[in-house]
Image (cartoon, rainbow, N blue to C red):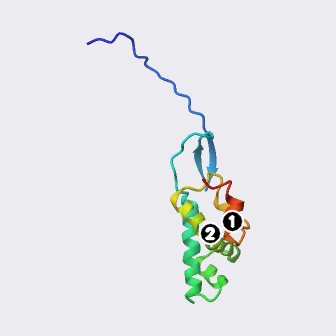
C-alpha cells in the first residue's frame, strides 16, 4: 500500500498563550474564550486548610491567643491573622477554590487583602473573578 501524498517530516502548530506567575509557580494562561482545564490552586487550598485548622485550634481552647498559636507555628501573628480571615469567605467561594473553579486572577495575595465580611458583598466584589 502506498500513499498518494507525502507526509511532511515537521509539523508546526501555533498555540496562543502567555506564561503568568501564580502561587509562586509559572502557569500557562490561554486566550479568552479558549477552554482551559480546571486546576486547583494548591497554594490557596493549603492556605484555606491552615486557616480552618487554626480556627479550630483557637475555638477548642487548645491555644488562648493568636500570638500563642503563631509562636508555636513559627510564623508572624500578623500573617496568621490575615490567613485566618479566609475562614470568613462565603461557603460557595471556598467551594469554588476547592473545586478549582475560581478565576485565574484569584490568588492568595489578593484574598489576603481586605475582603468584605458580608457574604453578599464578597459575591458582588468577586463576581468578575469567579467562573
How far across and how far down the image is residue 107, in percent? 64, 58
* Residue ID for mark 1: 122
Camera-side residue of 43 and 101: 101
Q: Examine the rendering and report whether any part of residue 112 can be seen.
A: no
Camera-side residue of 75 and 88: 88
Q: Quadrant of the N terminus?
A: top left
Marks 2 and 1: CB-CB under 8 Å?
yes
Who's the residue at 63% across and 79% down the image?
70
Residue furthest to the left: 1
Who's the residue at 56% across and 60% down the image?
96
Image-quadrant location for residue 110:
bottom right
Image-quadrant location for residue 46:
bottom right
Which callout, 2 or 1, points at the residue further toward the start of the chain? Answer: 2
How far across and how far down the image is residue 37, in percent? 51, 47
Q: Is residue 107 left or right of residue 42?
A: right
How far across and how far down the image is residue 68, in percent? 63, 85
* Residue ID for mark 2: 90
Who's the residue at 66% across and 73% down the image?
85
Q: Examine the rendering and report whether any part of residue 121 can be seen.
A: yes
How far across and how far down the image is residue 21, in percent? 63, 49
Q: Is residue 6 left or right of residue 30?
A: left
Secondary structure under badge 2?
loop
Q: Residues within 10 Å of mark 1 (few under 14, many from 20)?
A: some
Q: Is residue 87 above or below residue 108?
A: below
Whole-angstrom CA distance, mark 2 to mark 1, is 7 Å
Q: Residues within 10 Å of mark 2 (few under 14, many from 20)?
A: some
Camera-side residue of 17 and 77: 17
Secondary structure under badge 1?
helix
Image-quadrant location for residue 8:
top left
Amino acid at each position: 500500500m502506498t500513499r498518494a501524498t507525502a507526509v511532511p517530516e515537521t509539523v508546526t502548530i501555533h498555540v496562543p498563550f502567555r506564561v503568568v506567575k501564580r502561587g509562586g509557580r509559572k502557569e500557562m494562561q490561554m486566550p479568552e474564550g479558549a477552554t482551559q482545564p480546571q486546576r486547583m490552586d494548591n497554594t490557596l487550598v493549603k492556605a484555606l486548610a491552615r486557616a480552618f485548622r487554626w480556627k479550630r485550634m483557637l475555638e477548642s481552647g487548645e491555644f488562648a491567643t493568636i500570638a500563642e498559636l503563631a509562636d508555636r507555628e513559627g510564623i508572624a501573628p500578623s500573617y496568621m491573622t490575615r490567613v485566618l480571615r479566609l475562614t470568613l469567605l462565603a461557603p460557595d467561594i471556598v467551594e469554588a477554590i476547592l473545586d478549582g473553579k475560581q478565576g485565574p486572577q484569584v490568588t492568595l495575595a489578593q484574598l489576603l487583602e481586605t475582603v468584605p465580611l458580608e457574604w453578599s458583598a464578597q459575591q458582588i466584589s468577586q463576581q468578575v473573578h469567579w467562573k
